[in-house]
Amino acid sequence: MIDRETQVVDCRHGMGLGRGGGLAQRGTISEAGSSDVIAVAMSPGRRHITKPVCELTYGMRKENIQVSVLVLQAGSGVPDVEMTSGSFGISPEEIEQIARHKLAVIHVGNIPDHIMKKVREILSYVDIPAIVVCQPPVDFEDFAKAGIITKAVKPKEKDIRTKGRVMEIVTGVVRGESSTRDKLNELVKDVKITMKTI
């Protein structure tokens, strides 16, 4: 046993930039030994996932939560919008990779409209409970208005656009900056509580 508990993580899916490079590139997955939790990152850059995803993943693993990490191939931009930086999308392979897990932790950015569209796109394909991690102070009402099922507020039947559902929301996590201990603790607590209910 090393430290608290050893976790084996396979991060060889996809071509890396050298040692450890496969984990940080878009279109790659690092799979934990158990398919409990998958952290979904939005791939904002060609070579590095955002700082909070690494820290949040490390924080969960430190608390003995088995976490895989998926960096989306087309994680920048927003769905169905032509943008010079690219449009957000999710591939059939990525859908299958997310669906293998019991819980998704979806890390998105700081524009509420983009957050809703990205989370809705992912959860429209995958019937999985999710915890959303973002910067602005969004709530369950905001997700329900976008047609996303949540644990607290459900959209009208005719407006439902997802199979999956948002179980918890962790706000105040800034892209590219270190996460505070409070936010790490909040996420770990939410993951542990949600895992007991599913």
Image (cartoon, rainbow, N blue to C red):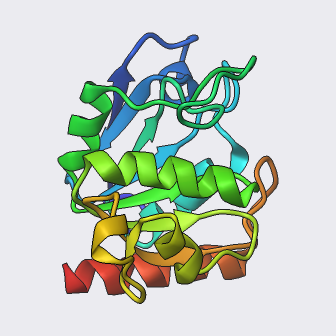
Picture residue at 55% right of the left edge, 20% below the top: 21
Quadrant hosting residue 104: bottom left
Picture residue at 34% right of the left edge, 26% below the top: 91
Picture residue at 35% right of the left edge, 21% below the top: 12
Spot the residue most to the front.
Answer: 158
Q: Position of residue 55 (x, y in %)?
A: 63, 56
Q: Is residue 68 visible?
A: no
Q: Position of residue 125 (x, y in %)?
A: 27, 45
Which residue is nearer to you in this view: 156 or 98? 156
Picture residue at 72% right of the left edge, 65% below the top: 173
- Quarter of the figure that contains the N terminus: bottom left
Spot the residue most to the right.
Answer: 177
- Quarter of the figure that contains the C terminus: bottom left
Q: Is residue 61 above or below residue 195?
A: above
Which residue is nearer to you in this view: 179 or 8? 179
Q: Is residue 36 above or below residue 175?
A: below
Judge from the rendering whether residue 78 lies leftward or rightward of residue 144; answer left or right.
right
